[in-house]
Amino acid sequence: MKYIIDTDPGHDDFFAILYAMRRLDVIGLTTVFGNSTVDNTTQNALRICDFAKLDVPVAMGAAEPIVGDFVVSAIHGTDGLEGGKSIPQTERHTDPRDAVQFLIEMGRAHAGKLSLIVLGPMTNIALALRDEPKLAEWISEISFMGGSTGTGNVTAFAEANVWKDPEAAQMVLTSGIPMRMAGLNLTNQARLSQIHVDRLANAGTKIGRHASEILDFYLTQHSARYTRTDGPMHDPSAVISLVHPDLFEFRDTAVSVELASPLLRGMTVCDMREIEPFPGEVLPTTNVKVGVRLNGPACVDAMIEAILEYH
Ligand code: BDR
Ligand code: CA
């Protein structure tokens, strides 16, 4: 299976990209607004690739959601990847194709053998599906970080990636593409802490040192926002579930995105009732494998080990 990572780097995207590149056949990155502007997230993706010597095309994507305005996440600092001695600027350029063209071309070329890992708002995927509906048949699966079966992070019930483009998320969730969700309820079970900052810093590798500074910034931001000193491993969890499915438990669930209510907009409504239909009753169709449990320490170790393979 080949993979494209659609991403808005992003501290946790940084770790997810490096992890994925060591463990999966990644044929490109597509970028999207989210943790910062798309100009910044694209630059960050190029900087990460250059710095870690990753030779993949980076295709720039959407700058704003399908409906409404884009709101930057303060938690990722000034440029989406703030922290420590920053990763050097790069001369690398984006692919001549934009994200939508890239997704469609790759989908056509690798039909049935291409999956997507989506780590930001789903705008690029929704726009690509709108331009080329056959993409839904070509893509084998989408593993995404987003949503929640319970509490949100941007609002009481909405998670950032879905909240930033709820219409796009709903289009993708109803496209018929098999979906695998790593929502907050799952990713909050994998915790990064000072122990991991130290482990990365003391490993004696250049990437380990930079990764420790990036993680340190991320944890500082999280502890200012939340009442604990460790932080959630969001984006890497959506990748690790593909490499180590044994560390995860998923449940087939009907999921829709709330679009109308001002209070609940961007909420992923996960129908987790364990019920049989009454005679004549039609229950909502299950469309997503929703992650409900993961082995946190094993997932974190898997991620750190992969980062320490870089020199
Ligand atoms: C998600 O939003 C971003 O802040 C992170 O990169 C992650 O993809 C978590 O809600
Ligand atoms: Ca992200």
Image: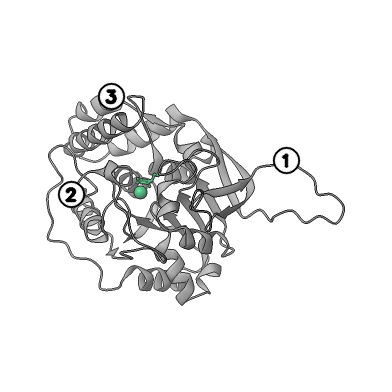
The mark that comes first in sequence, 1 or 2, is 2
Crowd tier of the residue under label 2, counting other residues whose Cα lies within 10 Å: few below 14, some 14–19, many 20 or above: some
Nearer to us: label 1 or label 2: 1
Marks 1 and 3, how far apart at CA: 39 Å
Q: Report the residue at 29% width, 66% height from top.
A: 59
Tag 2 residue: 51
Q: Secondary structure at mark 1?
A: loop
The image quarter in which residue 275 lies: top right
Q: Amino acid at mark 2?
A: Phe
Q: Amino acid at mark 1?
A: Glu
Residue 227: horizontal and vertical position, in percent?
36, 25
Disc number placed over residue 105 in the picture, else none: none
Marks 1 and 2, how far apart at CA: 48 Å
The mark that comes first in sequence, 3 or 2, is 2
The mark that comes first in sequence, 1 or 3, is 3
**Badge 2 residue CB within 8 Å of ligand 2:** no
Tag 3 residue: 194
Q: Amino acid at mark 3?
A: Gln
Tag 1 residue: 274
Relative to residue 248, is residue 160 drawn left or right? left
Q: Is residue 15 above or below residue 122?
A: above
The image quarter in which residue 116 lies: bottom left
Residue 301: horizontal and vertical position, in percent?
38, 30
Residue at the far right: name it: 279
Q: Are marks 1 and 2 in contact (CB under 8 Å)?
A: no
